[in-house]
Image (tube, rainbow, N blue to C red):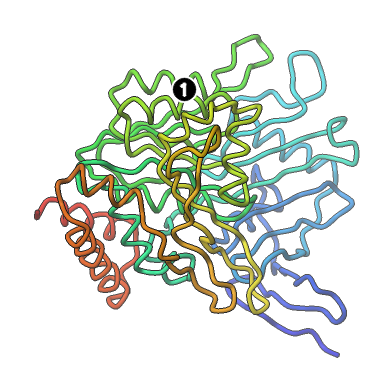
Amino acid sequence: MSEKVLAQYGRVTIYLEPNHPSPIYHVDGSIEPNPYGDIAVLLEDDELEEVMYNGGTQCVKVAHRDHGMCRTNVWIDDDAGIQIAKNIASFTNVPLGDGPGMVPIFDGRLPDGSRVNGTIPPITPDGPTLTIRKFREDPLTMLDLVKFGTVNSRLAAMMWVWIEGLDSRPANFVIAGGTGSGKTTTLNCLGMYIPWHRRLLTVEDTAELQVYHDHWLRMETRRERPDGTPEVDMNDCLKSSLRMRPDRIIVGEVRGAEAATLLTAMNTGHDGSFGSLHANTAQETVTRMINPPMNVPPIMLTGLDLIIIQARLHVNGNTVRKITEVAEIAGMEGTKPRLNIIWKYNAAKDRIEETGIPSKLREVICQAAGVTPDVFEKHVEQRQKIIEDLLRRDIRDIQTVTQVIQNFYASR
């Protein structure tokens, strides 16, 4: 049995070896000396989502957009790996090491925006590690998500109306899902729907969002430094952002006390705020938010309109990202929030469908905007036509798509 070539481009050949499920990502040619060492060529490939180095006893692994997890022909010994890790840590002003005033683990981002985590022994006793989530120079848009089948054009249009709120009552929501489900990508795509005349603040541990917006302020946390410089955490940033007259707030990943701060903002007039967190269902999202370390009082969750669940699935042998559930918080049942599932993924048909359960959020937006449900539906259909027209014309880049959306707002 011979090797099966899956793809060839530039210096790269991707192929399957007999009796091994993981493809080989093979790089031809030598690599010029540089701060990233032999992983530099991997960082140049826009088809890669992540680059993973697990020390000198293993080959470097990569996550490819089309071919999933791949082995590579790149091997880096521990000494070279530690030097690469130190070079990268220097970009984030972290003194990486095991001595006084140094740290053996760091998080940060590369000059191009890629997110990086690195460690050295003794934290990882088998050798140095690097995990790099690559930054896309050409960010995905909602048009891409429709093409990929993550959403359909109607749900994309519905989310547009929810986020704009017919200029009266924008929705508050969270996107939840597992690691690698595409939460941050979808969060970024939804940011395109925010009108430019609204002041947008984003709060993240490591800046990843790439919103194309005319009135945008980014905030990023800071870890405590070896010299004693204090930590500035997500909650510190979020509390500060509330003093900056934000119209919309996006929290990159909700993990702890900032959850209650965000829900307080949602309950006190900061409508149109959203964030992401790790959970696999709407019910699990609620459970996580009301328990430690988030500790959101259940009654405060009524300020949250929607929970959107995104998952990484295996469909017909391919790894795909899908929005699998959209739930509304429709009030309280005793001491617990009541969930209405208004969209649900149909695995048999490989598509997300409306469940037919009446939408409380539609009622809220209609009342705030002074329109009937029929007029609300016309707004959804109008935006769906715009999305489908852009798809037909094969327009998907973030600047053009965002400009079309903003021109639509300006023309009304």
Residue drawn where x is 70% and y is 67% of the image? 27
Where residue 278 appears, as percent x and y from the top left, is 61, 44
The foreground one among 334 and 144 is 334
Which residue type does callout 1 highlight?
Cys
Q: Secondary structure at mark 1?
A: helix
Where residue 295 appears, as percent x and y from the top left, is 59, 26
Residue drawn where x is 54% and y is 27% of the image? 296
- What is the quadrant of residue 73 in the picture? bottom right
Label 1 environment density (alpha carbons within 10 Å; few <14, some 14–19, many ≥20): many
Where residue 299 appears, as percent x and y from the top left, is 48, 29
Question: Which residue lies under the disc numbered 1?
Answer: 237
The foreground one among 75 and 185 is 185
State left or right for residue 44 relative to residue 53: left
Residue drawn where x is 58% and y is 75% of the image? 9
Query: The N terminus appears in which quarter of the rendering?
Result: bottom right
Query: The C terminus appears in which quarter of the rendering?
Result: bottom left
Q: Is residue 182 above or below residue 67?
A: above
Q: Is residue 276 above or below residue 50?
A: above
- Report the residue that reaches farthest toward the top: 228
Residue drawn where x is 52% and y is 58% of the image? 325
- Report the residue that reaches farthest toward the front: 334
- Report the residue that reaches farthest toward the left: 411
Q: Is residue 132 above or below residue 404?
A: above
Q: Is residue 59 above or below residue 107?
A: below
